Each structure stands twice: as C-alpha cells, then as structure tokens.
Image (cartoon, rainbow, N blue to C red):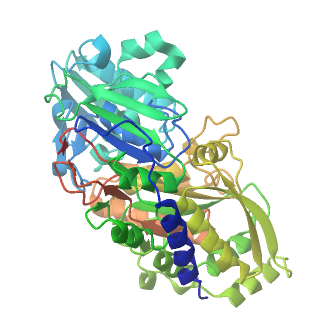
Amino acid sequence: MRLHRRRLLQVGALGMAGSLLSAPALWAQNSSNVIRIAVSAGGPRSVDPNQTTQGADNWSTEQMFEQLVRPRDGQFATTDDEYVPTLATSWEASDDGLTWVFQIRQGVQFHKGFGEMTAEDVVHSFNRARFDGVNTAVMGNIADVQASGDYEVTFTLTGPDPLFLGSTVFQNGASIVSKRAEEEKGEGFNTDSIGTGPYQLDRFDIENGVFLSRFEDYWDGPANIERVECLYIADTTAQTLALISGDVDIIEAVRAPGWVDQIRQRDSSLLVDMTNPGSFMTLHFNLNVAPFDNPLVRKAIATSISSEIVANAMAPMGQPTFTLSPPEYPTGWAHDELPEELRYDHDPEAARELLREAGFPNGIEFTANTSQREDYRSSMLIVQELMRASGINMRLNIMDHSAYHGSNRQDQNTLALHAASFPPVALDYMMRYLSTGAEVKPDGSGGTNYSHYGITIPGVDDELAAMQRATTMEEYTEIGRGIELKLQEDLPVMGLMTLGFTAIRNPRVDLGYEVESGYARWRFHRATKA
C-alpha cells in the first residue's frame, strides 16, 4: 500500500514555514553559562530515577545521578571491558559468576550537603530498585546485596549473568541516591532527589521544567557549564522557534516524515546528533481486552502492517525490524532468517482472511490511546492507514505525552505504542516488556509489561530465568533468539521499527564527544558553549 508521504511533507512544511515568520523571545537572553534543552512533553513527572518512565525526564536524571559503572559517553557498551569505572573504582566476579564484589569510590559527595557516599547508600539504592519502582523486573537476578565494608559492596546473584554490568548495574533504577535524603524527604524525594552527578536540582517546576546548577564538589571536577535547564515544550513548533531564535540550545528532533530535511534547509549550521539504532518502537497488544485476546486477530493486525513502509515514511531515522530485537542485535532476527509463517509479510487480503477465520467477517474496530508527540502520532497514523485497508478501523485518542504514559501505566490502553532505547542486552528489555514482575497495574504501581504476557499466556518467565542462568554469550543468545520466535508465535508485542533518537544542536554547544549510539539522552558534564 502506498502512503501519501508527499502530502505529509507538504503539510509539515507549510506549518513550519508559517510558524517561523516571527520568533518571539520566550526566555531571557541565552548566555554561555547555561545549556537549555527543550523536551517534548507537557511537564516533568519525576526526577527520581527509580520512578521515571517518561523519556523527557531522563534528560534531568542523566545529569543528576550516576551508577557504579557507565559506558563511554555517546556509546553503548557491548562487553564488560567497555564499561568505565564511575562510582565504583573496580569490580570482580567469582569463577561461578554468582558473586560480584565492587570497590566503591571514596570521597564522593552527595548534593546539597548530604554527605559522603558509602556502601550503605549503594545497598539502599539497589534494594529500593529491587522492591519498588519501575525497574523491579530488571533487578530480579539479584538474590542479595550487602555492604561488605565501608567502601565495598557484594552482590549475590540467583544465576550467573555474563552481562550483569549492562543488564542490571547500568540502569536508571540502579542510580545511587542518598539514603539519608530519601528517608528525610519521604514522598518529597520524587521531586527533590539527591544524587552525586555533575549537576544538582535547583527547581522542579511542574509547569515549565527542571532547573539544575553545577555541583561544585563533583568528584570528577566541576562541569564547564554553570546551569542546565530542561524546558518542557509539548508544542514542537514552539520548540523549533526557540531553537532558531537561539533561546534554547538543543531540541529533541521531531521524528516525523521529512522534518530533519526541513530544519536543515532552514538553518544549515545546526548540528544533528543521532543514535543508532535509537528507540525500539514496539506495539503492545492488551491480551486482557477483546478482540486482542484472539491470536488470529493479533496475526491479522501484524499482517496488515509493514515495518518497511512505516520505516521508509520516517526516513532518515526509521529502520525496519521484524522481531522485538532489531536484526543487528545478538538476539534479533533478519526477515529472511525467520520461518515464513512468522514473518507476517504485508498482505491486506491475508489479514482480512485471518479476521474472517477469527469470526470477524466485517472487520474490527477499536480505540487506542497515543501521544501527541510526533514520533508516536506519526507512527500510529501510518499504522492506522495501513490497517484500514484490511478492514481494521483503529480510532486514535491523541493525548498529551505525559498523560499518555500515565494512562499506559494504569492499564488503560488497547494497542499501546512504546518508544525506548535499549543496549544490546536482551534481558534488559525482555524483562521490562515480558516478565510477570513487570506487569502493568491499574493503580500505576506496575511496570511496562502492557500486554500482560507471562500471566495471560504463561511460560516466558521460565525462559527468562534460563537466560539469566546462561554462563556464556552463546547460550544466552540462543535462548534469547528462541524467546523471539515464541513472541512471533504468540504476538503479545511486535517490533514496528527502530527510530534513531535525534537531537538538533546549536553549533555554539560542543558536547565534548560524538554521539554514536546509546540512550535517548546526552550528558553535559564535558560540554562547552561559545
């Protein structure tokens, strides 16, 4: 099926051209002592790294918090030796892979006078992630964590994990926070969190954004730039105006057809930073809601959609994917590697036949929530048009981005699109999306298993546990690829495409490193500004 991409580009170009006729000064003059980034959401939800599910909030937490280890700036780490000592200075694993001992960096100070970080804070930080928040499933391989000295922490695992640093230690939820600060602040910690990073929180403004200042006692030396302001501007036209006029330094690119070309035409000096592969764009079927409880309906929807068509419409950022993992990841499958019956090649008539077989000769219709943010909205509009040709009528309820994530967390969606960046560590995203421990809950206390897979269709937890027990990368990858095939059979989720996360940067700002891969957020500790 052919989409009218030219029409989409024309509409977008007209909207941008009209909006750029004038550029009002939205903020005070932008000095060399501040980096302002505009993020695409209505307002911050949290700066507690154990609670953030909205990607926009991670720009702040990236500056405020650190883990025991981290990859090199601008990259994903794919092997243990690519991780850099951060709040740990060294670590070693036992021969059986069940015990990991970390030496904790001495002299590291928490923000706002909350004292020196010790092993007690590290243990507290991991325990809060294990038992509360949005990362509990990812922490499931930790059997115990103890302070074995003032500056030494020992982890005992339920099974050997050849990717423990990436699957568990370098996670948002594994950010080290001040135990004393959390105990004193209670629920207030959600919007006044205390970490060790190069920037500390000055102000959490639910209407406008998160405002940070340089932490002068940062263990690795003070950052070059004095302040970082993360401004929440849901309207992307307003974002673009702010960038062109110089009121902000960085904006999240509009991941919509033709937008990057348009902004380059407007100002060729602007710099484009793009991660590869970027965000996993995944569709999650709510298996507890009819008609998605019918596997034939899920297969009909998969057959009505073409990853290639969607990805091509989102060029240059979009790349097709055929399983949950992208083809270039160790557990991913290329199209031609998959058994023919699990490819779900785009075929509207075959999709109609599957619906007839499922008992829906006249097709189906349903309502799905989606975000107003362009990558979500554009992707779902394309999916909507593709499905319509197969007799599938999806009505879209387009919501504010923050409200959308809130509704997903409360199990209020039917076919949920989720965008997130992940390293090539399959257990990371499989635990988040598939495990019973990550099941979404109506009260918002659950995780991001929006499909209820593992509960409604049981069995995946055993495979994930086997993956955790793998002692070699070969065994780990083999089990992971088997899980991918099972997902293709059951279809609780489907990979729609990957979408390179892209930010547009004023050339006055030098990050101090090149962005190649990694999460959808950059650190500013080495940045300079002319």
Q: Nearer the viewer, residue 256 or 99?
A: 256
Pick out the residue farthest to the front.
22
Residue shown at the point (45%, 82%) measured from the top left: 335
Q: Nearer the viewer, residue 511 or 115?
A: 511
Q: Quadrant of residue 112?
A: top left
Residue shown at the point (15%, 20%) measured from the top left: 106
Q: Quadrant of residue 28?
A: top left
Residue 158 visible in image? no
- Left or right for 469, reference 131: left
Circle count:
0
Residue 53 visible in image? yes
User: Which image quarter holds the N terminus?
Assistant: bottom right
Q: In the rendered view, tell whether residue 71 sits above or below residue 98.
A: below
Q: Position of residue 256 (x, y in %)?
A: 49, 67
Residue shown at the point (52%, 65%) measured from the top left: 18
Q: Position of residue 201 (x, y in %)?
A: 37, 25
